[in-house]
Amino acid sequence: LNWPADCPGRGTALVDTASGRRVLVMNAMGRVMIEPVLDDPFPAVSRELEACPLGVACDAVLIDFHAETTSEKMSMGHFCDGRASLVVGTHTHVPTADHQILPGGTGFMSDAGMCGDYDSVIGMEKAEPLNRFQRKLPVERMRPAEGPATVCGVAVETDDATGLARAIAPIRVGGRLSEAAVSFW
């Protein structure tokens, strides 16, 4: 969403569901400790929310905020509170335990976690990342860890009248992490 205009791809999609609902899905990237420096995600997200307001032009708004720091992710959650159904962070690979409904009704979670082998270094076989941290030199390409995978994510139930969150829960299935199942489905 906040990449320069000449980059390929889009950061938003308005999806019509099988049940006749319209869902605005957005991906924006944070700027703290991320290169290249991108356009400011806050006005970019705000423009999209104004162009397709929740409860008017769409029934739900899901925002994937791909950022390094929980503080930037939390700031985006509060910035969108009351204007989006869900703001969920991605990028750091580790599921956080801060899933909540913000005061204005937006579901929020700092990071949904990765889908992959958690007996690893963020999904990679351990040897090469350990080598890079200890010796500061890459020796070989990183390879994906191939052990039992954990599927991580987040579930949100929205209010049909407002599009805001009524319930939020983490999802963790399989692999090494403790399982987290959704009770409201």
Image (cartoon, grey):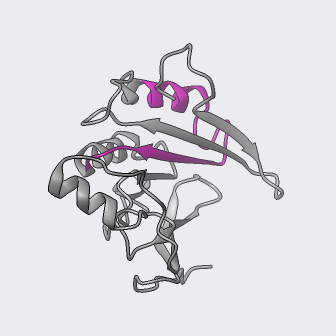
Question: Up-down: is 142 above or below 184?
Answer: above
Residue 155 x %, y %? 54, 67
Quadrant including the C terminus = bottom right
> Does residue 3 appear left or right of residue 19 in this picture?
left
Q: Is residue 168 something that shows in the picture?
A: no
As drawn, which residue projects farthest toward the top?
6
In this rendering, the count of numbered labels is: 0
Residue drawn at point x = 40 percent, y = 86 percent = 178
Residue drawn at point x = 52 percent, y = 55 percent = 164
Question: Up-down: is 144 above or below 137?
Answer: below
Question: Up-down: is 54 above or below 151?
Answer: above
> Does residue 153 appear left or right of residue 159 in this picture?
left
Residue 133 x %, y %? 19, 55
Q: Nearer the viewer, residue 22 or 139?
A: 139
Q: Is residue 62 something that shows in the picture?
A: yes
Residue 60 among magenta residues: yes
Residue 119 x %, y %? 38, 77
Q: Nearer the viewer, residue 36 or 119?
A: 119
Residue range corresponding to the magenta coloring: 44-69
